[in-house]
Structures are given as C-alpha cells and as structure tokens.
Image: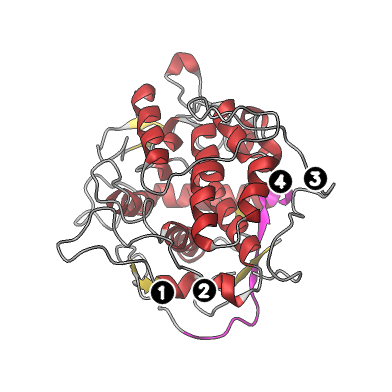
C-alpha cells in the first residue's frame, strides 16, 4: 500500500510544474533521494522572520459566503500551531472531530462520503485526479489559489457548522525539517503510525480514525496512517525556504514551492498524506497547506504587483481541452461542490481583498 502511495507522490512531483530543485550548500542535488541541505538561518532571525521581496509591513484573513468586492477592515489572524494554548488546541480538535462526526451532505455528488469532513476530502479528490490526467488543482496555474480557497472552506465549516471561534492554525515546518517525527505539531496530531499496525495512527485526537475515501480515487475504508520520511522532510529546510522566497516571479515561486516545501510536508508526514489525490484524509493536511499559504502571503507582502501576478503560472487544466489550453487568470473559476459558492482565482489572490480577510502572525 505505502510503496504505491510513494510512487504516486513521486510522479506528482515530476508532473508539468516540476523543475530542478536547487542544490543546497554541501548537497549533491540527488533528486532521487530528495536530499536537503543544512538548516541555516543566514539572518539569525526566528523562523517567523523570513526575508521577502514585498513590503516591510506584512498584513495578510477570512469569511464565508458569496464572493464580493467588499473591504477587509478587521482581518482575523492565523497563528502558528505551537503558539496556541492547550485550551485553543483542544477547541480546534473538538471542532475538527465535529466535522468528522457530522453526516455528509454530498452523497448524491461524491461517492463514498460518510462525514461532513469527507465532503471536503471528496471535493479535493474530484478535482485532484492527477493520475487520471484530469487534475484541476495541482499541475495547473491555480495550485496555490485553489488551496487557499480550500483552506478557507475548511475554516468556514469549522466556524459555521462546528462553532469554532479560535485562530486558524498552521504548522511552520521549517524548524522541524528532517525530524517531523519529533515535531510538536505532529505529536499533537497523534504522531507517526505504528509499523506493526500498517502505520495506523493510534494516539492523539485522531487515534484509530477510519477514513472512507482513498487511497487516490478508490474508496477503501482504512485507518488513518502516517509513515514519515525524514529525507523528504528536508525539502522544507531553510535552504529551500530561502530559495523559494528569493524568486521574483509568481510562476517561478509557485513551481519551486510545489516541488520543495509542498513535497516536504506530504512526503515527510507520509501515509495518507503522501497520496496527492486523497491527502486531506489526514487532518494535518490543513496545517501543511495553511503553512504554504503563509509562505505565499509572506512572498506577496502588500505588493500589488505580486498579489496579482499570474503570468506564466500555468493552465487551467491538466488535460488539454479540444479548444486548446487556457492560461490561468483572475477569471479562472474555482469550485467547492457548493460547500461554498463558486468563486474566481481573482477573489483569493489578496488575503485582505474583501472575499478573504485574514493576516498571519
């Protein structure tokens, strides 16, 4: 099972958005083994103080409902997981478990869904079928925009259907690169799986959690799994963070992030997370993609050019339509199976643009 998932994720990283990863100082650039470089903060700053090309004043928040061009006057603040109090962590887990217990509402549209959380997973499965050649969310120009919308939809469900009122958390993976197994975030989410139990997660709030969707587009009931890979997680170290943040165009930024920091989180956690289609089966998915959104937000700054830069980012579809490829633009539609109304890429480019209203701490 796991070898097949690893193959799937390796192919994921080799699809059209892929390009050469930077060779870290002292590294050999061996992409087959996904070696990372030495963790190194060249500026002596904390892991929240990355350099970026945008404005020195970084502001970046969220509401549900129909897309509007309204203003964002009081953005909410998303927080790094390890800064939350225990009460805040408990409240977050309670809300996530609420989604996992609530009945699905999309059975007529998505096969195999059991819980409201599965509705969310299923919307990713239906639009992320990379192996089937019909992906819309990964090997396309709207990779980051689609997942920003997806994390926002998760927040909407937590708040509006499960009463969550705390900050939306993310996991800053850079300090944990090379050692996800001992990460406070991973341990809080139940740690790695047990080898003798096929890497099933048996601790924490999601212990012995049955997943009904996946692997991939199959619907095979199985326990939540994690099988970490320290080498993969090294793709999230400071060397790669610096390389990603140094890119000056969105197209280059998104491509490099896709093959390094993005791959680090999925491959480094492993198990269900390593399958690119059904990876939201693991609730830690939203910590990971919240982090990628944080990195994008940092790169954008309050620089209007960067916020709206989509030139050369890619096409709307993996498969070429009969009428030819269409480049991703601000008018590109994003869908969530009516969990939230359809929007466009342009609606989510600015986290303070009105449809979204949040910043990061």
Q: Earlier in the sequence, mark 3 or mark 1?
A: 3
Q: Of residues 260 and 19, which is closer to you in this image?
A: 19
Q: Of residues 107 and 337, which is closer to you in this image?
A: 337
The residues tagged by marks 2 and 4 sit, at their Cα atoms, a distance apart of 31 Å
Of circles 4 and 3, the one toward us is 3
Residue shown at 45%/61% (left/top)? 157
Q: Earlier in the sequence, mark 4 or mark 1?
A: 4
Among the 4 quarters of the image, the one containing residue 238: top right
Among the 4 quarters of the image, the one containing residue 24: top right
The residues tagged by marks 4 and 3 sit, at their Cα atoms, a distance apart of 23 Å
The residues tagged by marks 4 and 1 sit, at their Cα atoms, a distance apart of 34 Å
Residue 77 place in picture, x, y as percent: 66, 65
Tag 2 near tag 3, CB within 8 Å: no
Crowd around label 4: few <14 · some 14–19 · many ≥20 (10 Å): some
Horizontal relation, residue 126 to residue 117: left or right = left
Q: In this figure, which residue is indicated by the disc labeled 2?
A: 308
Q: In this figure, which residue is indicated by the disc labeled 3?
A: 42
Tag 4 near tag 1, CB within 8 Å: no
Q: In this figure, which residue is indicated by the disc labeled 1?
A: 330
Tag 1 near tag 2, CB within 8 Å: yes
Q: Of residues 168 and 206, which is closer to you in this image?
A: 168
Residue shown at 31%/40% (left/top)? 213
Q: In this figure, which residue is indicated by the disc labeled 4?
A: 82
Identify whether 151 is placed above or below 273: below
Q: Earlier in the sequence, mark 2 or mark 3?
A: 3
The residues colored magenta run 69-87
**Element assignment for label 4:** helix
């Amino acid at each position: 099972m796991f070898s097949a998932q690893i193959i799937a994720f390796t192919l994921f990283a080799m699809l059209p958005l892929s390009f050469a990863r930077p060779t870290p100082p002292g590294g050999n650039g061996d992409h087959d083994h996904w070696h990372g470089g030495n963790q190194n903060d060249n500026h002596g700053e904390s892991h929240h103080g990355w350099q970026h090309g945008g404005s020195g004043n970084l502001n970046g928040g969220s509401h549900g409902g129909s897309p509007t061009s309204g203003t964002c006057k009081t953005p909410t603040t998303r927080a790094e997981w390890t800064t939350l109090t225990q009460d805040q962590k408990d409240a977050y887990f309670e809300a996530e478990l609420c989604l996992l217990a609530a009945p699905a509402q999309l059975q007529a549209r998505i096969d195999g869904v059991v819980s409201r959380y599965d509705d969310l997973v299923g919307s990713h499965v239906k639009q992320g079928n990379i192996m089937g050649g019909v992906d819309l969310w990964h090997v396309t120009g709207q990779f980051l925009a689609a997942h920003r919308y997806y994390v926002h939809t998760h927040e909407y469900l937590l708040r509006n259907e499960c009463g969550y009122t705390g900050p939306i958390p993310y996991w800053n993976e850079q300090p944990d690169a090379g050692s996800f197994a001992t990460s406070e975030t991973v341990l809080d989410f139940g740690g790695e799986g047990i080898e003798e139990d096929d890497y099933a997660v048996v601790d924490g709030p999601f212990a012995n959690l049955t997943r009904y969707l996946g692997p991939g587009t199959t619907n095979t009931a199985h326990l939540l799994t994690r099988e970490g890979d320290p080498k993969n997680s090294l793709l999230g170290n400071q060397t790669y963070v610096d390389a990603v943040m140094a890119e000056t165009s969105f197209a280059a930024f998104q491509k490099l992030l896709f093959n390094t920091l993005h791959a680090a989180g999925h491959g480094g956690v492993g198990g269900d997370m390593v399958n690119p289609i059904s990876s939201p089966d693991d609730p830690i998915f939203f910590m990971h993609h919240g982090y990628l959104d944080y990195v994008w937000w940092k790169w954008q700054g309050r620089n209007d050019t960067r916020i709206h830069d989509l030139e050369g980012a890619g096409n709307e579809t993996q498969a070429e339509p009969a009428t030819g490829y269409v480049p991703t633009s601000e008018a590109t539609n994003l869908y969530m199976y009516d969990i939230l109304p359809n929007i466009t890429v342009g609606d989510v480019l600015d986290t303070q643009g009105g449809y979204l209203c949040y910043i990061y701490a």
